[in-house]
Image (cartoon, helix red, strand yellow):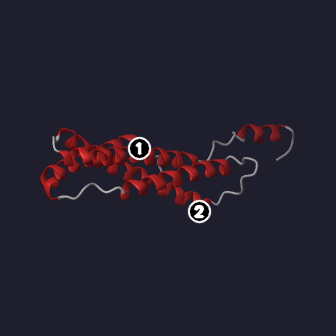
Amino acid sequence: MRPTSVSALAVAALAAAAVGWLLLSAFYSQMPRLPWLPIIVLVALAVGEAYLAQNTSARIQHKVGAGRVDPLAVARYVVLAKASALLGALFGGFSAGLLAWLALEPTRAARDDVPAAVSGVVASLALIGAALWLERACQVPDQPDQKDGDDSDRRAGRS
């Protein structure tokens, strides 16, 4: 499995920003205030994934006091990290599109929704960072080349 591409996340964010802008410009007068619950969920995911990244990294690097690594759990963490990075890019782009439209709208209702849009962008960036950190933490470190050791064993008459 390949690492998450930052360019793919950027394209997803730009597409979501365009959708956010278009939806808000068409339906803002009929919408309630922007909700805070999705932002809270993104922050909780970011905190959880940051914890998993720190814990998994310590386990993979065999740090003192860290338990064994469950390979199946690490595979699940990678899938979670990749999905969360994409979710963060989509929600962040959508929130950025909303924020751009709200910044240009002169009404009081738009000004009241700006903090939720800014928080959505910040929470999304936190989730993307934690997800990429978790994905990186799940990588197996490079093993020293054992070819050299095998050659010295052969020279010494051991096979």
Residue at left offset 34%, top offset 47%: 92
What crowding class fits label 2: few (fewer than 14 Cα within 10 Å), some (14-19), or many (20 or more)? few
Numbered circle sitting on residue 74: none
Comparing 114 with 155, the one in front is: 114
Looking at the image, is 82 positioned above or below residue 122?
Answer: below
Amino acid at circle 1? Leu
- Pick the residue in front: 44 or 140: 44
Q: What amino acid type should be assigned to the residue bearing mark 2? A: Leu
Residue 138 is at least partly visible in this image: no
Instruction: Pinpoint residue 51: horizontal percent, then vertical percent.
Output: 58, 51
Taking the spot 26% from the left edge, 49% from the top edge, the residue there is: 16
Mark 2 in CB contact with mark 1 (< 8 angstroms): no
- The disc label shown at residue 125, or none: 1
Q: Position of residue 110 (x, y in %)?
A: 21, 46
Which residue, as the protein is rendered here, is positioned at the far right? 157
Residue position for label 2: 72
Can residue 141 be seen in the rendering of this structure?
yes
Residue 31 locus on image (x, y percent): 19, 58
Q: Which residue is at a point 76% across and 48% down the rendered structure image?
A: 64
Q: Is residue 148 above or below residue 65?
A: above
Q: Residue 12 in the image: state x and y as whole percent.
A: 31, 47
Q: Earlier in the sequence, mark 2 or mark 1?
A: 2
Using the numbered discs, state the Cα–Cα distance from disc 2 to disc 1 in whole angstroms.
27 Å
Disc 1 crowd, CA 10 A, few/some/many (<14, 14-19, 20+): many
Left or right: 16, with 141 as reference point: left
Q: How many marks?
A: 2
Task: Give the foreground label among 2 and 1.
Answer: 1
